Amino acid sequence: MSAVQQLTLSLPKWINDVVDWQKVYNTDDEKMALAVELSKQNVLRGTGGPFGSAIFDCVSGKLVSVGVNRVVPMHNSTAHGEMMAIMLAEQNVQSFSLSADGIKRELFTSCEPCAMCLGGTLWSGVKRLVCAATADDARAIGFDEGPVNASSYQYLTDAGIEVLRLVQRDAANKVLQHYANGGGEIYNG
Ligand SMILES: [Zn+2]
C-alpha cells in the first residue's frame, strides 16, 4: 500500500451557524469581532485550538473566507486559523494570490501569527494584517509562536503589507485563557 497522496481540510460544521456571509463589515472592530467569535466558538464547541481568522475585501467590506484552528482534529500541524482562512480564500478567488485580481484583501486574526502564518500572510498577497491577542499572550498559555521577531514584521511592512496590532486584544486573550483553564490541548508547546 502506498502512502497517502491526497488530503482534505475542512472547517467545522457549525461555521454557517455563526457566520453571516451576506453581511458587509465596515469597521476594524466588526471584522475583528468575527475573528474573535470564531476563536471562542472553536473552543466552546471543542473543534480545535483557540484561534480564529477572517479575510475581507478591504474596500467592499465583504467577507471572503474564515478560518479556525484545526490542528488536532485534522491531524495537521499547518491547520492554523490563518492558514485555513488563506487557503480557503485562495480557493474562493481561484488564485494563489489574493491580490492578483487587483482587489485589496485583509487578514484579521484573533492572535498574532506564528512564524508559519506570518510567512503564509506574506505569500497570500493580502495587503493588510490586523491582530488581536499578542504572541506573548499565546506563549503565556504554552503555545510556541516560533521564530517571530520585529524584523519579521518589518519584512511584511517593507513588502507593502499594513500591520495593525492590539485590536480587541482583551477579548481575544480571554478566549486563550478560557482554553487553557479548560485543559485545552497545547500542541507544539
Ligand atoms: Zn500559525
Image (spheres, helix red, strand yellow):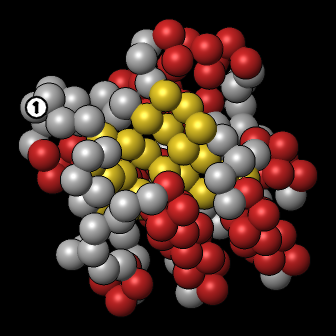
What residue is shown at x 36% (from left), y 25% (from top)?
123
Q: Is residue 68 visible?
A: no
Residue 144 at what x, y percent from top left?
A: 77, 41
Crowdedness near tag 1: few (<14), some (14–19) or many (≥20) residues, C-alpha within 10 Å? few
Q: Nearer the viewer, residue 50 or 155?
A: 155
Residue 50's quadrant in the figure?
bottom right
Residue 76 at what x, y percent from top left?
A: 48, 52
Residue 21's quadrant in the figure?
bottom left
What residue is shown at x 45% (from left), y 59% (from top)?
27
Q: Nearer the viewer, residue 169 or 151?
A: 169
Q: Is residue 89 left or right of residue 73?
A: left
The total number of labels drawn is 1
Q: Is residue 159 visible?
A: yes
* Residue type highlighted by circle 1: Asp
Residue 137 at what x, y percent from top left?
A: 82, 51
Q: Is residue 90 left or right of residue 43?
A: left
- Confirm or reject: label 1 Cβ below 8 Å from ligand 1: no
Q: Nearer the viewer, residue 75 or 38?
A: 38
What residue is shown at x 86% (from left), y 58% (from top)?
141
Residue denoted by label 1: 101
Q: Secondary structure at mark 1?
A: loop
